[in-house]
Image (cartoon, rainbow, N blue to C red):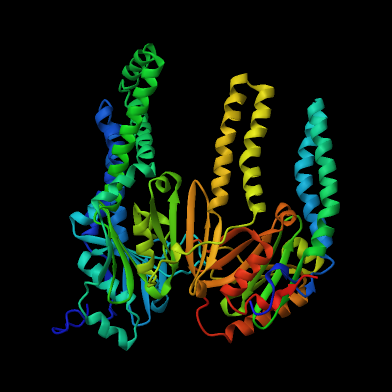
Amino acid sequence: MDGVSNEVLRLRAPRHQVSRKSITLWTLHALIGWAVLLVPQLVALVFAASPWQVAAAVATLVLGTAHTLVMPRWRYRVHRWEATPDAVYTLAGWLNQEWRIAPVSRIQTVDTKRGPLQQLLGLSTVTVTTASAAGPVLIEGLEHGDAVRLADELTTTTQATPGDAT
Amino acid sequence: MTTELPAAPEYAEPVVDWHRLDVRMLVVRPLNELLGLVPLFVGLLVLGKGETWRILVSAGVIAAIVLFGLLRWITTRYRITAEQVELHTGLLVRKRLAVPRDRIRTVDLTAKLGHRLFGLSAIRVGTGQRDQPGEDGLTLDAVSSAEAERLRVLLLTTAKAATTAVAAQERTGTELSKWDNRWLRYAPLTLSGLVAAGALFGFVANFARELDIEVLDPMTEAAHWVARQPLGLTVAVFAGVVLLVATLGSALVYVVQFHGYRLTREPDDTVRVRRGLLTTRSVSVAEQRLRGVELVEPLLLRAGRGAHAKTVTTGLGRKGESNLLLPPAPVTEAHRVSAEVLRQDRSPTLTPLRRHPVAALRRRMVRAVVPPLVLAAVLAWFAPDWTWQVVLALVPFAALLGWDRYRSLGHALTERHLIARAGSAIRETVALQRTGIIGWRVSRSFFQRRAGLVTITATTAAGDGAYHVVDVAEADGLALADEAVPDLLRPFLELAD
């Protein structure tokens, strides 16, 4: 390490934030997930309401509300991305966070993908795959236009790089 | 057919015409499948009282297998051109596979018992392409053993002019390691015997019940007799029997799997592992595709100073331990083989490792001790007293395991390799070629953040695809990653205030 002291080394945040609309997207995801848990419980309550069931339903409701309120905003503050001529760099997560770095010279494919909710909000996910079986580098929650532009850019630089990326 | 070239018998001319699989497969495939179905037929015919439907079903199954084999043989063709290997197969669903030859990483020859009786081998060509999970590369099942050997050399010899000269040399190769009878003493430490004995017992018991054979009754009587004996004797006899069965079983499994083991470096720069008593396998890995070596030491094997080794490489199927480099053997042998295979004077796996911070020990201890404590508390509520007492008595052992897990943690960097070690019940030491690293992941859970730790993951095209340096101090881990692959991480690092 040339002159850089180990004690104080850390990863800096990637340069760009994701779209603010991602908060809405994550909120919707959370709502759907908790609804799947809660609705059957409520239906069951209509037929027979033991104290245990009521307690479980109330706990689900409280946890669900807290998660739906906190998680999307926390995530929005964490999620960031950056693409340099040499590498793609992302940070994602909330309680557990993960930085991912993929060198452009090792990129195999670049795709954009939009689920139904993302289409509704005009968002896209950019998926950058390498030859590793450990999964791709994902940039979630970009404005669709930005995502397409980024994917094109990465595809062009990747094609200009020789080798088979393994 | 190829044009006959009388001279140069060793020269591997690319095959351009379409070839069929060996015609002997018409016999071998049904034979192999029927061997697996023998219990079924015994069940249907011998045991039954000769009802017509049982005979009809058996005949139908056999006919279907033979017909299927015939169709497969008729519809399957392959050819090897200068650029690629092509395989056409299937009657209703036509499948056309083409693998570019410069993408071929490994060639795996497998000969089951049926194949060997007729001098045949199945070839699997591995490419390291992971686009289609479940696709297990390109398989030719089967061709004659001579043809298989010819194809192996041909496929692993890239179409460069220089290498054909090498291929023309004698094909003996240098021997790096071979079967040693003394290795058998590591067999009982693998527990494979217990597993095999358990599976066999389950199979026999199940089968016996199917056949209404009175195996269980005499055994129940024996159990009653045993129960009448003093407890100490019962335990001793039981332990003795289990130990004996496990030892014999594991030795048997070891011999069947690994007999005739030979590790060689071939003149065409491939590393080749040959092994097997009944089913023989020969796995060849192009050396330039070898990304490292992994040393595996399960707890018992480690106690006996043994280890087995795996290759870290692209293009090997997941099935049947095709990445095996060395069967359970002395750990010194494992280090020696690693050094030989990686062409290093001293095995990277012997590099002194950097310990991880004490916070990592705390995490190991919490993870080891808290679950049994919680379980004990829950059992104290619901279950009889002795259950939570037993669980509580296990806590010290859990703590020992946690301590050992911490002692296993370590990482190091050599000139060419990144070394990471983790695990207690199965301790794995990986030496990963630094040039084989194709990305980094740095993950930090909520609790890791409070402890100032991160898990650094090197992603690679080979082996498991990702190798972890678990619970390392944040700054140390980042410095390690930065040094291992120069210039990749550097633009994203900063100094904390």
Q: Position of residue B289 (x, y in %)?
A: 42, 73
Q: Position of residue A81 (x, y in %)?
A: 74, 72
User: Where's the N terminus of chain B, which quadrant?
Assistant: bottom left
Q: Position of residue A106 (x, y in %)?
A: 57, 76
| Above or below, A62 relative to A135 | above
Question: Front-most of A94 and B315?
Answer: A94
| Above or below, B416 relative to B226 | below
Question: Front-most of A84 and B354?
Answer: B354
Which residue sits at x=17%, y=80%? B9
In this rendering, position of residue B176 left or right of residue A23: left
In terms of image quadrants, where is residue B320?
bottom left
Q: Residue furthest left?
A: B6
Question: Front-most of B223 and B130?
Answer: B223
Asked whether residue B214 is in view, the answer is: yes
Which residue sits at x=68%, y=28%? B378
User: Where's the C terminus of chain B, which quadrant?
Assistant: bottom right
Question: Front-most of B420 and B85?
Answer: B420
| Above or below, B398 relative to B464 | above
Q: Position of residue B15 (x, y in %)?
A: 27, 78
Which residue sits at x=51%, y=73%? B434
In terms of image quadrants, where is residue A96?
bottom right
In terms of image quadrants, where is residue B170?
bottom left
**Image mark count:** 0
Asked whether residue A125 is in view, the answer is: no
